[in-house]
Amino acid sequence: QVKRSGKNGYRFFAPELNTRHQGRIAIENDLRVALKLGQLELHYQPQVSLSQRRVVGVEALLRWNHPDDGLISPAIFIPIAEELGLIGEISRWVLEQACAQLAAWQKRGHDNVKMSLNLAAYDFDRGDIVAEVTDCIARHGLPPGQITLEITEHMMMQDTPGVTAKVRRLREAGVGIAIDDFGTGYSALAYLQKLPISALKIDRSFVKDLGGLMTNPIISAIIGIARGFDLDLIAEGVEHAQQAAMLRALGCDVMQGYYFARPVQADDAEALFSMPPRSVSG
Ligand code: C2E
Ligand code: MG
Ligand code: MG
Ligand code: MG
């Protein structure tokens, strides 16, 4: 759905933007303006521990609040921002915003909630991501262990120069590293031996197919890997009580998905910190 259109750069055709007479927009200009005018916002999706019966973390998810087109998904504009070289600016904004928000929550007593945020492949290929992250965390007076950076398995496989070293330095600084969408990357598992990551996120495609003959063994295997490497484990995309119950039966405790909460604005997320999450029976 994203199309390249000659020297004007990127134009894009997506249902979200296919509004009224205006079938396309110049995304590059609009994205630059979005950054300047503060049209980007972070929403926060709770991560729930069933055994602790509380929200143990949130994932910061970026939205572009476009004046004409409403909220635009990062799945649409992040890849374009990467190609346009705007991802550094966006990631720095996300990092700053997420750290500031976590610090504000901690000041109000919510000091047992962690923050996860997503980085793009190119973040490991530009500037010094290690310094950016550790400086930002320090500036906000946060314990580094309260921040987890989510990177996809796909990014690990691209073999970006130095990515292993950067991940190691971030871990040495105490920052968490989670492999997002785990199990979808056609990967050799060898990188798990080399990268000192701290968490795995079971991709929602597996959660969706739970109960299927071929899916439960995969989830069990992922849970086994997490245990073997002593990694935190989060299942994402949990939409139904039954999925949560099956995941728990397989040995997964922390979950994220519409069943528990959608990504919401900061205040709404905070309200969920003091409420027990929806129950899971069976
Ligand atoms: P992700 O990191 O795997 O994030 C999970 C996505 O699944 C989010 O989509 C979330 O809204 C959605 N989701 C959560 N629970 C459910 C559920 O129960 N069912 C279904 N169907 N979906 C669920 P979102 O917010 O549209 O983000 C899409 C992707 O964009 C993210 O996937 C992440 O890769 C990327 N992204 C989001 N925010 C950022 C950011 O700040 N920086 C970068 N570089 N990438 C980001
Ligand atoms: Mg993520
Ligand atoms: Mg994911
Ligand atoms: Mg995903």
Image (cartoon, grey):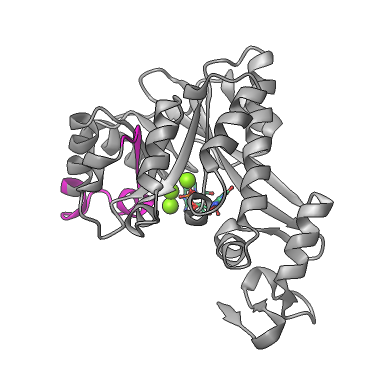
> Which residues are drawn in magenta?
196-217
Could you say which is closer to the camera, residue 25 or residue 174? 174
Position of residue 2 relative to residue 252, above or below, is below
Camera sees residue 50: yes
Whether residue 169 is in magenta: the answer is no
Q: Quadrant of the N terminus?
A: bottom right
Residue 213's quadrant in the figure?
A: bottom left
Position of residue 221 relative to residue 24, above or below, is above
Camera sees residue 45: no
Seen at 76% across and 54% down, the residue is 35
**Where residue 2 appears, x then y in whole percent?**
57, 76
Q: Quadrant of the C terminus?
A: top left
Q: Seen in the image, is 109 located left or right of residue 114?
A: right
Whether residue 207 is in magenta: the answer is yes
Could you say which is closer to the camera, residue 267 or residue 167? 167
Residue at the far top: name it: 109
Position of residue 237 relative to residue 276, above or below, is below
Seen at 51% across and 20% down, the residue is 276
Residue at the far bottom: name it: 6
**Where residue 172 appears, x then y in whole percent?**
40, 27
Position of residue 248 relative to residue 9, above or below, is above
Q: Seen in the image, is 114 located left or right of residue 80?
A: left
Q: Seen in the image, is 48 located left or right of residue 79?
A: left
**Where residue 280 appears, x then y in whole percent?**
37, 29
**Where residue 7 appears, x then y in whole percent?**
69, 85
Residue 231's quadrant in the figure?
A: top left
